[in-house]
Amino acid sequence: MELKTLFSPKKIGNIQIKNRIVRSATFMFMAEKYGYVGERLLNMYEELAKGGTGLIITGAAAMDPSAAGGPYQVCLYNDSHMPGHKKLVNLMHNYDDTRIAIQFNHLGRLGYHPKYPNFAPSPIPYKGSGITPQELTTEGVKEFVKKFIEASLRAYECGYDMVQLHAAHGYFLNSFLSPHTNLRSDEFGGSAQGRTKILVDINDGIRDELGNQFPIIIKLQSQDFIPNGITEGEGIELANIISDAGFDGIEPSGGGAESIEFTKNTLPSKIIKKLEEQNYFLPFAKMIKPFMKECNLILVGGIRNPITAEKILQEGDADFISLCRPLIYEPELPNRWESGDLSPAKCISCNSCLAVMQKGPVYCVTKKNLEKRNQ
Ligand SMILES: Cc1cc2nc3c(=O)[nH]c(=O)nc-3n(C[C@H](O)[C@H](O)[C@H](O)COP(=O)(O)O)c2cc1C
């Protein structure tokens, strides 16, 4: 079978991506102290670019000092961070026009910053840490909108091709979307319109400065998988509002620290028979794709088989497919598939990469163990 669609170009906003393969945001714990892009990150992204990925989304980057999850998280909230980012963007563009988006995140109520409180829409404690976050005032929320906009403008100045807002996995922006964590009675709470207002305001603020020349995509919570959280029905409503607001792409995900559904620990891909066990956000994608119009659907979550990926694209259920763990194991995977080796990704979704992320840097433990055994 020929992977005609998987290796065909498509635009996100005004940016042409050479194929439909996206590297989903992956926090690598590889910045230099404190938050700078250095050799380790450049080398890691160079491997990905060489391997043929069309669009690389960086790991979650801090858009404010209070957002950083430790000294090894990439930051972009002041001018001193910019030279490293410019180097990275230039490196990517030199590899056959690889495109790169920066993902911005704030840990919100899931944070553990020694200097700053955990900011959130409402003071709902996070059981994992026992910390009750600090509720933002209406003015405080507007300050955060500004911080996301300013960081995005810096990203544009560094040459990034687009920005991704992280509004999934329980972090700051997700906590506004969720009725479990957003009990506000001002304009940033209440109805689905109110809970998405922070995202729409960030989008509008970036557009006011840059128009449509800098695409804005979003990793969007489809479901929280916790009591009182975002349900599937609400996830559909949120996606509808977001695509109508003019975002250029949605990458639906779900779960988070309180319900780890976003990296399902699936069976090894060779054993998996059922499609839905593998591409676990596909059923949700099918529900939102029909109303997404100009907004691209980037499908992430357990995609391991290139033939299935091609089918999903051909049937119009997604515009791009997005991979995280498979590209930790095999950064050269897109080239392997394009060269005709259509065996599934070697990743067995064991989550060993996620386990090492706590101490960093991130690598595939399974691959390393196999290499050791074969020596
Ligand atoms: C080590 C690791 C780091 C991750 N870091 C991020 C991140 O920074 N931002 C994000 O949105 N998702 C992050 N994720 C989630 C992935 O982007 C992706 O949604 C998830 O792994 C499912 O895709 P996969 O089955 O291709 O791995 C991370 C996942 C792993 C395993």
Image: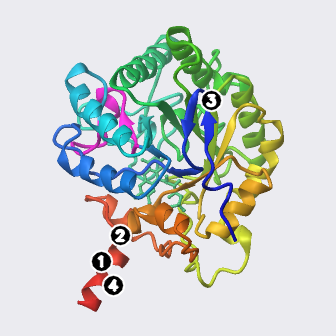
Task: Work out how far the residue at label 1 is from the one at label 3, CA to CA, in angstroms.
Answer: 46 Å
Q: What residue type is labelled 3?
A: Leu
Q: Are the residues at dot 1 and dot 2 in contact (C-beta closer than 8 Å)? A: yes
Packing grade of label 1 (10 A; few <14, some 14-19, many >=20) is few
Name the N-terminal-most of marks 4 and 3: 3
Residue 311 occupies quadrant? bottom right
Q: What residue type is labelled 4?
A: Leu
Mark 4 residue element: helix
The residue identified by callout 4 is 370
Q: Is residue 346 left or right of residue 227?
A: left
The residue identified by callout 1 is 368
Q: Which amino acid does label 1 sit on?
A: Lys
Task: Work out how far the residue at label 2 is from the one at label 3, CA to CA, in angstroms.
Answer: 40 Å
Residue 196 among those drawn in magenta: no
Q: What residue type is labelled 2?
A: Cys
Q: Which residue is drawn at 48% across and 73% down?
A: 347
Q: Where is residue 205 in the image (x, y as percent from the top left)?
A: 53, 13
Q: Where is residue 269 in the image (x, y as percent from the top left)?
A: 58, 77
Packing grade of label 3 (10 A; few <14, some 14-19, many >=20) is some
Mark 3 residue element: loop
Q: Are the residues at dot 4 and dot 3 in contact (C-beta closer than 8 Å)? A: no
Packing grade of label 2 (10 A; few <14, some 14-19, many >=20) is many
Task: Work out how far the residue at label 1 is from the one at label 2, CA to CA, in angstroms.
Answer: 6 Å
Q: Position of residue 352 (x, y in %)?
A: 39, 71
Mark 1 residue element: helix
The residue identified by callout 3 is 183
Q: Residue at x 18, y 37 (%)?
A: 34
